[in-house]
């Protein structure tokens, strides 16, 4: 099922080479995408994400009409640390949802995961752009975060559709709380960062609701706790590095 998250790659096609004969001629060789094609596609997507070349499909929430208020050096470092954490969260979301989609056998659930991943690309681009405006950088550990999250997504995708969607819903619930906490501690005059975080938070709410409506099953308490613990390690590290 095609979705907004679909990516085409040079040299790969669901349809084989066309025949030079009339329309009634025997069809040409048809090549189906296999596991290797999917894995190569995911490697390509990972390289795009980690090379910081993501392009948003929607308008930047901190557009030219939003004034860039002066921030002290300390405030800029703090805002940059928070936006770097948010960028890491989006790197992880890309990897997590792509991994879940690869391992998911249900077409509708797979489409939901890939659509969410596609919208998270906007967040990735917005956070990277704001970090540039703050004269800062993305996390040096992004390749590690991506690989770990993709592996986690593969595991979640094997747990069945209700648990797979439950993992998505719980992830969005925790990210929503995390973004809400950032809105409380970002510098008051940093309206540009606040606008980005506000839009991200609204999108995460929509993703959670979509997963719940699609049949997400609540995860066991130990798994939710483990997810929060891993998130604390990631956010503490990404704030600085």
Image (spheres, rainbow, N blue to C red):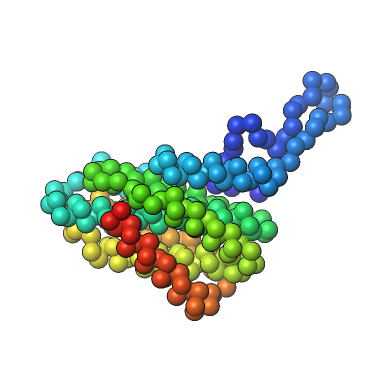
Question: x%, y% of residue 45?
Answer: 52, 43
Q: Residue 221: x and y, percent? A: 49, 79
20 in relation to 15, above or below: above
Residue 74 place in picture, x, y as percent = 15, 55
Residue occupying image coordinates x 49% and y 58%: 149
**From the viewer's perspective, is 147 left or right of 64?**
right
Residue at x 68%, y 58% (from the top left corner)? 105
Residue at image location 53% in from the left, 74% down from the top: 219
Residue 113 appears in view: no
3 or 103: nearer the viewer: 103
Give whichever of 206, 152 is nearer the camera. 152
Residue 206 appears in the figure: yes
Could you say which quadrant of the image residue 82 lies in? bottom left
Front-most of 181 and 50?
50
Q: Is residue 32 left or right of residue 229?
A: right
Which is more toward the observer, 69 or 235? 235
The relative height of residue 229 versus residue 86 in the rendered view (above or below) is: below
Left or right: where does residue 181 sit relative to residue 47? left
Above-or-below relation of 44 to 234: above
**Residue reaching furthest bottom?**
221
Q: Residue at x 33, y 60 (%)?
A: 237
């Amino acid at each position: 099922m095609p979705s907004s998250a679909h990516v085409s790659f040079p040299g790969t096609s669901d349809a084989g080479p066309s025949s030079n004969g009339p329309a009634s001629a025997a069809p040409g060789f048809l090549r189906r995408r296999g596991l290797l094609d999917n894995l190569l596609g995911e490697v390509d997507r990972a390289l795009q994400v980690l090379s910081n070349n993501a392009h948003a499909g929607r308008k930047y929430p901190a557009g030219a009409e939003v004034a860039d208020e002066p921030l002290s050096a300390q405030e800029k470092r703090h805002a940059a640390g928070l936006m770097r954490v948010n960028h890491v969260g989006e790197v992880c979301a890309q990897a997590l949802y792509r991994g879940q989609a690869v391992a998911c056998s249900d077409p509708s659930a797979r489409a939901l995961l890939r659509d969410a991943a596609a919208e998270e690309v906007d967040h990735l681009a917005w956070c990277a752009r704001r970090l540039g405006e703050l004269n800062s950088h993305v996390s040096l550990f992004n390749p590690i975060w991506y690989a770990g999250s993709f592996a986690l997504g593969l595991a979640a995708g094997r747990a069945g559709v209700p648990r797979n969607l439950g993992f998505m819903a719980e992830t969005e619930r925790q990210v929503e709380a995390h973004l809400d906490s950032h809105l409380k501690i970002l510098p008051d005059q940093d309206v540009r960062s606040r606008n980005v975080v506000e839009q991200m938070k609204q999108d995460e709410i929509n993703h959670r609701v979509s997963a719940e409506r699609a049949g997400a099953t609540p995860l066991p308490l130990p798994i939710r706790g483990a997810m929060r613990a891993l998130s604390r390690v990631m956010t503490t590290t990404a704030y600085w590095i």
